[in-house]
């Protein structure tokens, strides 16, 4: 069955030209269902996992509906982290590249607030910001939200998990009473429903997650490991598969630092990112990873929000996630937009029940990985299931892993 094309939306020539330049031809399910509703002016609740094209799902209609003659803030996009705010702003700028009359800026903590104030004074049409920095601008009276007629809450569930509910409500209360509110969330807990009930008007539910919360293009497996042997197993995965780009998740900042340090000491081209790092340092790390100058990025869950890097071949859960939904968010970083990818989870014998909880939550099969060495086979508590699927990725050690 042929997928629908963007041409069927009858978008403006400038937006369609931008999509052609970006190589966008076919609509993803979230885009096909959301864009017409947003163009009609309705509120929506979009439930979709990471990597489904939701930024374009709200970005295209925002740009189409914008009245650029008014040099004022008309649209606001709230994101849980700085990285996501920067990523969303960059994507919106690409969509508006042929609309020279539209000004889009990100505002977030860690960046000079003076520079942000100077940009806001000149006049901005779309602001993409984190809740904390938006509240800061409101207190300083450096941003006027009464002119905002369109608000997007991107990854709303994560913003609520991070404790931003009060900030979000303060921000929404300051916008136009006639605003259009678009809410996007990977999960739909009761807190999201309450927020929607309070701030949206007869929203349409757009749900494209299907029966499984994870995409079928991700080959998911787990390897049981003894305490103290995780780093050695991680090395075996990297050496065996030779991924040119992989994302390693740890539950704590300290673990991120330790794993990244140990991998670097062993000669692997590795970078790390977590919330305690200065914004400039985080930007440099992401630039290296995005441009392929580092092969492994070790991160915490919160810091990884907004990592939208094409071509991540594998996600490795060095620590099994504490929250079931974090598993979905983590592996959503690979196999984006129809690509294939791998997800490995390192599991201690005492964590098998947690693994079962994740399987039940995600409604997915996470198979036991075949042993990578005789030593690994010794650690297995049952006969392994050998995957028949073979890696389609080409070895890429050139300039990636440095051997001492």
Image (tube, grey):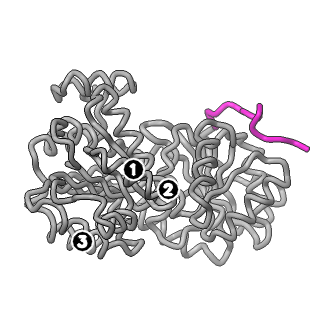
Residue at 47 percent across and 61 percent down: it is 109
Q: Considering the image in quadrants, where does the C terminus appear? A: top right
Judging by the rendered image, the residue that carries numbered circle 1 is: 106
Residue 223: mark in rendering? none
Residue 398 part of the magenta segment: yes
Residue 261 part of the magenta segment: no
What is the count of numbered marks? 3
Image coords of residue 195 (percent x, y):
22, 70
Judging by the rendered image, the residue that carries numbered circle 3 is: 169
How far separated are the C-alphas under marks 2 and 1? 10 Å
Disc 3, SS? helix
Residue at 46 percent across and 69 percent down: it is 324
Which sits earlier in the primary sequence, circle 2 or circle 1? 1
Image coords of residue 257 (percent x, y):
71, 64
Q: Which residues are magenta?
A: 391-404
Which sits earlier in the primary sequence, circle 3 or circle 1? 1
Residue at 40 percent across and 53 percent down: it is 116
How far separated are the C-alphas under marks 3 and 2? 24 Å
Judging by the rendered image, the residue that carries numbered circle 2 is: 111
* Disc nearest the viewer among 2 and 1: 2
Disc 2, SS? loop
């Amino acid at each position: 069955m042929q997928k629908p094309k963007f041409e069927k939306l009858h978008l403006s020539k400038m937006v369609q030209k931008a999509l052609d330049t970006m190589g966008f031809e076919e609509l993803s399910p979230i885009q096909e269902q959301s864009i017409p509703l947003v163009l009609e002016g309705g509120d929506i609740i979009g439930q979709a996992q990471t990597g489904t094209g939701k930024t374009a799902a709200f970005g295209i209609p925002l740009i189409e509906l914008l009245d650029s003659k008014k040099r004022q803030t008309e649209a606001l996009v709230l994101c849980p982290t700085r990285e996501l705010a920067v990523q969303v702003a960059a994507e919106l700028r690409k969509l508006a590249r042929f609309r020279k009359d539209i000004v889009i800026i990100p505002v977030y903590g860690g960046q000079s607030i003076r520079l942000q104030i100077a940009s806001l004074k000149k006049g901005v049409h779309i602001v993409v910001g984190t809740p904390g920095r938006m509240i800061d601008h409101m207190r300083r009276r450096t941003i006027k939200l009464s002119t905002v007629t369109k608000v997007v809450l991107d990854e709303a569930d994560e913003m609520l998990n991070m404790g931003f509910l009060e900030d979000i409500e303060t921000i929404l209360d300051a916008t136009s009473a006639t605003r259009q509110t678009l809410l996007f969330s990977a999960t739909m807990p009761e807190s999201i429903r309450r927020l929607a009930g309070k701030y949206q008007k007869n929203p349409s539910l757009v749900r494209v997650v299907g029966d499984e919360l994870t995409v079928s293009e991700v080959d998911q497996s787990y390897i049981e490991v003894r305490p103290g042997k995780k780093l050695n197993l991680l090395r075996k995965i990297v050496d065996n598969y030779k991924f040119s780009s992989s994302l390693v998740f740890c539950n704590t900042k300290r673990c991120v630092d330790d794993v990244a340090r140990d991998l670097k000491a062993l000669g692997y081209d590795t970078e790390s990112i977590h919330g305690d790092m200065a914004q400039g340092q985080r930007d440099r790390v992401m630039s290296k990873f995005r441009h392929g100058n580092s092969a492994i990025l070790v991160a915490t869950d919160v810091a990884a929000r907004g990592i939208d890097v094409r071509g991540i071949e594998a996600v490795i859960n060095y620590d099994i996630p504490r929250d079931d939904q974090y598993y979905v968010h983590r592996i959503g970083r690979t196999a984006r937009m129809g690509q294939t990818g791998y997800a490995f989870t390192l599991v201690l014998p005492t964590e098998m029940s947690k693994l079962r909880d994740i399987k039940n939550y995600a409604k997915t099969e996470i198979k036991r990985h075949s042993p990578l060495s005789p030593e690994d086979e010794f650690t297995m508590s049952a006969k392994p299931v050998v995957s028949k699927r073979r890696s389609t990725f080409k070895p890429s050690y050139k300039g990636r892993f440095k051997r001492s």
